[in-house]
Image (tube, rainbow, N blue to C red):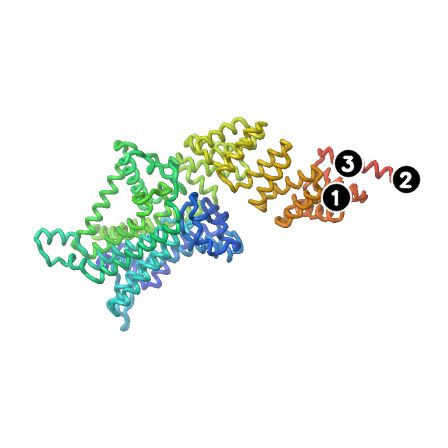
Amino acid sequence: MAELDADLDHIIPASVLPPFWAKLVVGFVSLVCFARSYDGDFVFDDSEAIVNNKDLQAETPLGDLWHHDFWGSRLSSNSSHKSYRPLTVLTFRMNYYLSGGFHPVGFHVVNILLHGGISVLLVDVFSVLFGGLQYTSKGRRVHLAPRASLLAALLFAVHPVHTECVAGVVGRADLLCALFFLLSFLGYCNAFRESNKEGTHSSTFWVLLSILLGAVAMLCKEQGVTVLGLNAVFDILVIGKFNALEIVQKALRKDRSLESIRMLRNGRLLFRMALLTSGGAGMLYVRWKIMGTGPPAFTEVDNPASFADSVMVRAINYNYYYALNAWLLLCPWWLCFDWSMGCIPLIKSVSDWRVIALAALWLCLIGLICQALCSEDSHKRRILTLGLGFLVIPFLPASNLFFRVGFVVAERVLYLPSVGFCTLLTFGVGALGKHVKKKKRIAAAVLGILFINTLRCMIRSGEWRNEEQLFRSALSVCPLNAKVHYNVGKNLADKGNQTAAIRYYREAVRLNPKYVHAMNNLGNILKERNELQEAEELLSLAVRIQPDFAAAWMNLGIVQNSLKRFDAAEQSYRTAIKHRRKYPDCYYNLGRLYADLNRHVEALSAWRNATVLKPEHSLAWNNMIILLDNTGNLAQAEAAGREALQLIPNDHSLMFSLANVLGKAQKYKESEALFLKAIKANPNAASYHGNLAVLYHRWGHLDLAKKHYEISLQLDPAASGTRENYGLLRRKLEQRQKKDV
C-alpha cells in the first residue's frame, strides 16, 4: 500500500489525510454532485413503486410487506415481477409517514444522503482493498486514509453512472443494498483482525455478522447475496495468499511443500467457507420459498438477446452487453433511463464490427485476471483480485448467466461494480505514475476527470428532475428505442398536447410494430378525437398481438360502442373482464353500454360490480343514481346516493345527483344543503346553479330561483332548458307583480 501511495505522491499533491478529513472531503463532493435532484419529481418507475404502491400507506398492514414484491403485488402471483425488497419498501413507507404523504423532496434527500454515506464508507473499504496504512503519534496508533483510498473514493463519489440510483427514488434499493454489502464485507475483514487478538470465537462472530448483513443487503435488493462470494474470494486469495502461479510451478517440480495447497487444508478456512456456503444456500432457499412460483416471465422486448434461437447469437450479444457496461463505467457520457426496445440492435453475425468491443473487453479481463492470480507481487495481486472481485461478482445476477433478466443494460446495476472499477482505475493511475516522468500531466488528467464527472453528475441530476427532461434526454442517446418515444408521447398526452403525442406514439409503433402499449395509447387519443376507424384498427391489432391485454380490449369495446357495434362492444368488454377479473373501469363501461341499450337491470348490476371492486368509483355511483332517478326509483336512488357519499364524502358530483333525487322527493331543505355544498366545491358549474334554481322554483323561493337561473345562464348562455325555465319564472313574477298592483 505504501508503494502505491508513493506512486500517487506527485499525482495527488497533498499530505496523507487523517480519516475524518478524507471522509469529510469525499462526503461533501458526493453531495455536491447530486444536490440538484433534491426537489425533483417522482419520475419513471417511481410512479409504480411509490405513488401507486399501497404498501406505503398506513392502511396496509406492515406484515404485508413481507409477502409483496417491490411494486406492491403479491409475490406468489404469476404476474408478479418477483423483485423482493421489503426493507427498501419499509424505508419508503417511513418516508411517506414522516413527509405526511407523497412529497418527493424527503424521498430524494434520503437518496442523496445515502450516496454520501456510502461514498464516505468506501474510504475504509478502499483502505482494505489497497492494504491499509498506519503511523504512530504520541504513543497511539493512528489509521490513515492514504492517497489511493481517497482518490478511489472520490472517483466513486463523482461517477455519473450513479445518477439513476441517486436521482431516481427507486434507486434506493441499490443504495441500501450497497450500504449493507459494504458493511458485510468490512465485517468479514474484521474477523481476521479480531482472530489475531482473541481467537476463534471472535472470528466466528464477525463471520456470522457478515452473513447477517449480507441477508439484510439481499432484502434491500437481490444483488446483496453476492457479498458472500466476494468474502470467500477475499478469504482464499488475499488472506490465504492463494497463488496460482506458485501452484503451477511447484506442481511441475512435484514439490509437496506448497503453501497454497496447505492453506486449502486449513480447518479454520474450511469452517468459514462452510459458514458462507450454508448461509448463502439458506438465503437463496428462503427467497425461493417466499417467491412461491418460478421466475418472472419477461418478454422479448425486455431482453431480446435472451430470446434468440441461436446459442451463438445469445452468447455474442450477452458479451456485447458486458462491453457496453464496461464502456459506461469508463466513459459515462451517453446515459439513458432505458436501454431496451431497439436501443441496442442485436448482433447477428461475427462480421458485425461491434464484435471488436467483445475482443477488447476479454483481452483486458484476461490480462487482469492473469496478473491477479499469477503475479509474484503479493500487493499487486491483492489489489487486482479485490478490484476484479468487486467489479464482477456483484454484476453476476445481471449477467444472464444464471437466469434471464428483464433488461438489456441498466445503469443502476453498476453501482456496486463501480467500486471495483474505481479500484482498478486508481491502481492504473499509480502504475502509470511509475513510468511517466511528467507526473503533473497525470495529476492534471485526474483532476480533469474528477471535475468533468462532477459537472456531468450535476447536469444529469437536472435531467432527472422531471419526466419531460428525462425522456427527451434519451432521444439523442437511443433514437431507435421505441420505449423512449412512447414515454415522451405519454408525457405530452398527460399535459394535453395530443397532436405532438400522436407523432411520438406513431414513431414508437414504427420502430416496434408489436408495441401494444403504444398502440393502446394512440388508439385512446384517436378515440377522443373521434377518429374511430383508425382507433379500432390499432386496438384490434394490439389484442391480436397480445390476446390477454385487458386494457386494449376495454378500449376497443368503447370504440365499438361509439360506432354503434353493440354486440362486438359487449364481447370486447367481456373478454377484458375474462383476462382481468377485478376490472372496475371495464364494468363501468359495460354498464354504460347496457344503459344505452335500455337494459337497465344489467346496467345497474355492472355498475354495482364496479363499486364493489372500487368503492371510490365516483362515475359508477353517479350513473347508478341517475339511472334509478330517471326510471322513477327515487327511494333506491336516494339509498345509493347516501351510500356513495359515505364512501366519497367530498365528491361534488355525487352531492349534485343526490340533491336532484331529494328535490324530486320534496325533501327541499336537505336538497338545498347538498346543492349549496356542491356549488361551494365547484362554483362554475352552470348545471349546479340551474338545478338549484329549479328546486327554489318548486319550493316557492322565487327570488332565489331567479338569482341562480341568472348565474347559470351567465356561465352557460346556450343552456336551452335553463333559459326556458327562467322564462317561466319571469312570467310568474310578472303575474305576481300585477296582482300586487
Residue 313 is left or right of residue 611, and the answer is left
**How far is mark 3 from mark 1, CA to CA?**
20 Å
First of labels 1, 2 by sequence position: 1
Residue at 23 percent across and 50 percent down: it is 432
Q: Say if 257 sits above or below 532 in the image.
A: below
Residue 408 is left or right of residue 644, and the answer is left
State which quadrant residue 5 falls in: bottom left
Residue in the foreground of this view, choosing between 593 and 538:
593
Residue in the foreground of this view, choosing between 346 and 475:
346
Which quadrant would the C terminus be assigned to in this image? top right
Q: Label 2 belongs to which residue?
A: 739
Where residue 163 appears, as percent x and y from the top left, is 40, 48
Residue at 47 percent across and 34 percent down: it is 518
Residue 260 in view in this figure = yes
* Residue 725 circle label: 3
Residue at 36 percent across and 39 percent down: it is 303
| Crowd rating for badge 1 (residues with CA inside 10 Å; few <14, some 14–19, many 20+) | few
* Residue 665 circle label: 1
In contact (CB < 8 Å): disc 3 and disc 1: no
Label 1 element class: loop
**How far is mark 1 from mark 2, CA to CA?**
31 Å
Where residue 670 appears, as percent x and y from the top left, is 73, 48
Query: Residue lying farthest left?
Result: 253
Label 2 element class: helix
Where residue 444 appears, as percent x and y from the top left, is 30, 50
Q: Amino acid at mark 1?
A: Ala
| Crowd rating for badge 2 (residues with CA inside 10 Å; few <14, some 14–19, many 20+) | few
Q: Amino acid at mark 2?
A: Lys
